[in-house]
Amino acid sequence: MSETSRNDGPHVTCDLPCREATHHPLGPSMFQLTLSSANKDEIFSEALSDLDKSHQQTSTILQNLQKWNPATAALFTLRSPSTILSTPFRLVYPNEHLCAFDEAGLYARQFLAISYCWHSPDFQPGDSGCHDVWPVKKSIVDAIWTEKPHPRVGIWMDQLCIDQSSSADKRASVAAMDIIYRSCLRLVILLEDVLLDEQEIRLVQKYDIFTRSFDRTWNFEPDDVAVFASFYDKVDGARWWSRAWCFHEFSVHQPWTDKRQSDGRYNATFILCGPNDTTVKIKWVNLQLLMGSAAYVLPNASGWVKGQAIFAGVGLKSQDQERGWRSSIMARHNGVSDMGSSLLEDRLSIMMNLCGLGLAYVGPGLGSTDEIFYLSTLLALAAGETAPLTLMHHQSMRLQGNPTWLSKHTVMNDITIPGFKIQTLTGIHQIQPAQIELDMLFLDAPWESIKPQHLAPTYTIFPHTIPTTPPATHISAAASRVMSIYSYSETDLDLPRRRFLAGCILSGARFTTRLWTQIQNDIISPNYNTGAFKNLSPNPTFTVPATRFLTQLFPISTLLGISQSSHTFTPHDAALFLTWLSDPRSMYYIGLHTFRTEYSPRPRPDFAFINSMTCNQYFRTANPEQQHQLRIAIPTHLLASSCIPLRAWILQPVGVPGVQRWRLVGKALVLGEGDLEDEARGKGERVRVERVVVCG
């Protein structure tokens, strides 16, 4: 048979591009088709359309990188539909399906993509580990073939369909990997290192949601819990969950969409091993349900469900995306940062693909995960994500042995970073590994801690230890799991809570009302009143403390209605505020110490809280003179953002006096602030905007 056509008749000249694939025999029992551009364009159409839509955003990212750091910009190049269509794409079929192409010609209908772990020194299945030209054993190959819903549906598997001897073919295929896995009819996942016994197989069959009647309150029968524990440990221990490319393949397949979740034709199939060289198939919706149940059934199971990271950032509604919102690039970086890959730069490519960026990395090999973090940070900032400006760790970073302004977060691999709106951060002027040049608003006012003598009014509100108010949940098991996170007692938390409360009383009703509005909008509404948690409601035992709190904030004449106040802070607000104060989730915002800064002096003083400080070794080793020189500054692009991230930078002057160069020694929350930009425009005595260089 000809490699270019199955038609042995006379040659016909045609001006139209060839639609048929190129045929190649592959081993004794199957063949390979190299698809035409027209065939690829049809199969990849939806994914290529999305790639094309991202062109403007991706071009803007490269333009920003070029402005900030031309050398870094040169490490990336644009991907386009034309580059994807020029990449060879091959599918394999069993020989007996060749006759299905007699009428339609060598034109593929669709394909299934295989996701699996390559064999390694950690996992060598032995002589039975490979069948024919396949990198897996025969029973798994047979299970793969039976997944094909139609003879003209092919199979794509990297070791069979990418020329492993061609570095150019491998590089081009890596750049197209998201398009391939996004476009496949169905994903087939091989958990080759999971061997189920008969009891575990029966468990899977028994709790198959496609065969069971719907029951929202379902749970495992008591006799099945021990079998489920064994099943969970085996699946949870599969290598597939920890490999970066496997994570990529599953994520870009978009298993959370209605199409993938609700229709078995498109829902991913997991193939596991059974006794006597058999195989077991489990649909993703079933596996997700079973594995997710462990948190409520198995006492020692991790709250982290394997595969959960794929859902990072997918909560954005389509209308939000149309308005320019995108899921966090840094969350995607964190989701893949610790996963295994033979090449570190692959993790960067994976992160870009997961974010839908039409970029390909063309730079040299990377030597450390910190280099990946640096490049991911620049990409995020270039896209308009400000999250990298809010990260802080107690130990400063070093890049290639040198200090850097960069910092990681104390919560490693956080995939819950919220989405961002695409924008150009005009307040950033230059970024190098060692330093960043940007516009910052300085709060030149001194910042002072709440002293013991300030706490007296809080004891009129709560004469005894402030009681903790556990968060109410819709699921009883969730409440105990949440409370188990907070190991501190009411006695441990009493002093930090009193400092925060005393700061509010010292700062007055105007500040407290504004702070409470900020807390409700930025914290409670999006983060407390969501998911398994019920809406925050006043602790019924706080009616009297709320009244006492109001008497500390307002004069008696206001409380009696004799005089008017421009500040709306009702008894309900006071009770709900104290409930929030006593909620263990609020300790992130309260911190150990509360600092106040009076950024607008008398006759109309105004304040802001500086809380939850995270400082590095430069802060901890500063002498008294250096501590006196510390300044609080906020990047201008963070002024209008939520109060949840660490927006305030704690800076220490370095170098020659008079030169605007600062070392980053810490970051903190800013709470309850007014319009600082307006204050700066009004040439406030203690607020100014400057273009400065910050180093590590």
Image (cartoon, rainbow, N blue to C red):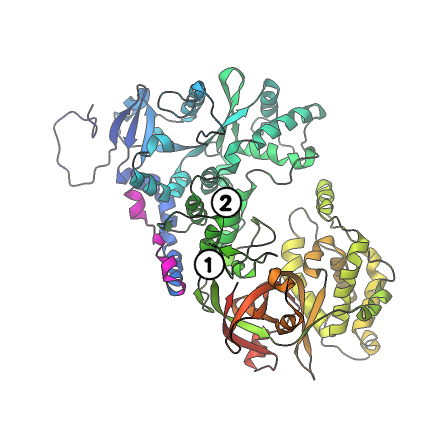
- Which of these two is toward me, 411 or 96? 411
> Which residue, given by chain and number where applicable, does mark 1 sit on?
324
Rendering coords of residue 659 (x, y %): 50, 76
Residue 50, can we see it?
yes
> Helix, strand, or loop for circle 1?
loop
Against 419, residue 281 (above or below) is above
Rendering coords of residue 40 (x, y %): 31, 39
Q: Which residues are magenta?
A: 68-88
Q: Is residue 75 magenta?
A: yes
Tag shown at residue 398: none
Against 118, residue 404 (above or below) is below
Q: Quadrant of residue 446?
A: bottom right
> Helix, strand, or loop for circle 2?
helix
Rendering coords of residue 389 (x, y %): 53, 61
The answer to whether 103 appears left or right of 196 in the picture is: left
Amino acid type of the residue that numbered disc 1 sits on in the rendered structure: Gly
> Which residue, given by chain and number where applicable, does mark 2 sit on?
336
Which quadrant is the N terminus positioned in? top left
Q: Nearer the viewer, mark 1 or mark 2?
A: 2
Distance between mark 1 and mark 2 Cα atoms:
24 Å
Q: What residue is rendered at 63% in x and 66% in y?
A: 622
Amino acid type of the residue that numbered disc 2 sits on in the rendered structure: Val
Q: Is residue 651 magenta?
A: no
Q: Quadrant of residue 16?
A: top left
The answer to whether 579 appears left or right of 618 in the picture is: right
Against 12, residue 419 (above or below) is below
